[in-house]
Image: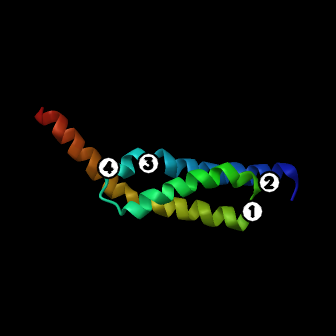
Amino acid sequence: MNHTERNNLIIRLNNCLETILELEHELEKLDLNRNFLEELDVLKDFMQKVEKVQINEDDVQRIETATGSFLKELRHPLSQLDSSKKLFMRLQ
């Protein structure tokens, strides 16, 4: 694998991780297991080391698929959170 291909894989991996971490504030509002939220800190630490990780196309594809599945699973709970916030704002 050449340098450009590796950089592209790292960029794709970082994109997945950043996408999840961008939801941290919203995830904290959901009734989630505290261990799950602590895992977000592990993701943050991992992002600092991602440049050193050996990774290949199959790994990145699996992570992209898992990220997509994770986001799909969160669609309903996060939409409920948004709906309740809008309702609360209308009641004020």
Say what secondary structure mark 1 lies in: loop
Q: Residue furthest right?
A: 2
The residue that label 1 is drawn on is 55
Give the amino acid at mark 1.
Ile
Residue appearing at x 50%, y 49% in the figure: 21
| Disc 4/disc 1 C-alpha distance (Å) | 33 Å
Q: How many residues crowd mark 1 within 10 Å: few (<14), some (14–19), many (20+)?
A: some
Say what secondary structure mark 3 lies in: helix
- Residue 14: x %, y % from top left: 64, 50
Q: In the rendered view, does 33 fall on the left or right side of 88?
A: right
> Which of the two discs, 3 and 2, sits closer to the camera?
3
| Disc 3/disc 2 C-alpha distance (Å) | 28 Å
Q: How many residues crowd mark 4 within 10 Å: few (<14), some (14–19), many (20+)?
A: few
Dot 3 or dot 1, earlier in sequence: 3
| Disc 2/disc 1 C-alpha distance (Å) | 8 Å
Q: Is residue 49 visible?
A: yes
Say what secondary structure mark 2 lies in: helix
Give the amino acid at mark 2.
Arg
Q: Is residue 71 visible?
A: no
Give the amino acid at mark 3.
Glu
Q: Quadrant of the N terminus?
A: bottom right
Q: Quadrant of the C terminus?
A: top left
Q: Which mark is residue 24?
A: 3
Q: How many residues crowd mark 3 within 10 Å: few (<14), some (14–19), many (20+)?
A: some
The residue that label 2 is drawn on is 6
Residue appearing at x 17%, y 41% in the figure: 87
> Which of the two discs, 3 and 1, sits closer to the camera?
3
Mark 3 touching mark 1, by CB under 8 A? no
- Residue 34: x %, y % from top left: 38, 60
| Disc 2/disc 4 C-alpha distance (Å) | 36 Å
The residue that label 4 is drawn on is 29
| Disc 3/disc 1 C-alpha distance (Å) | 25 Å
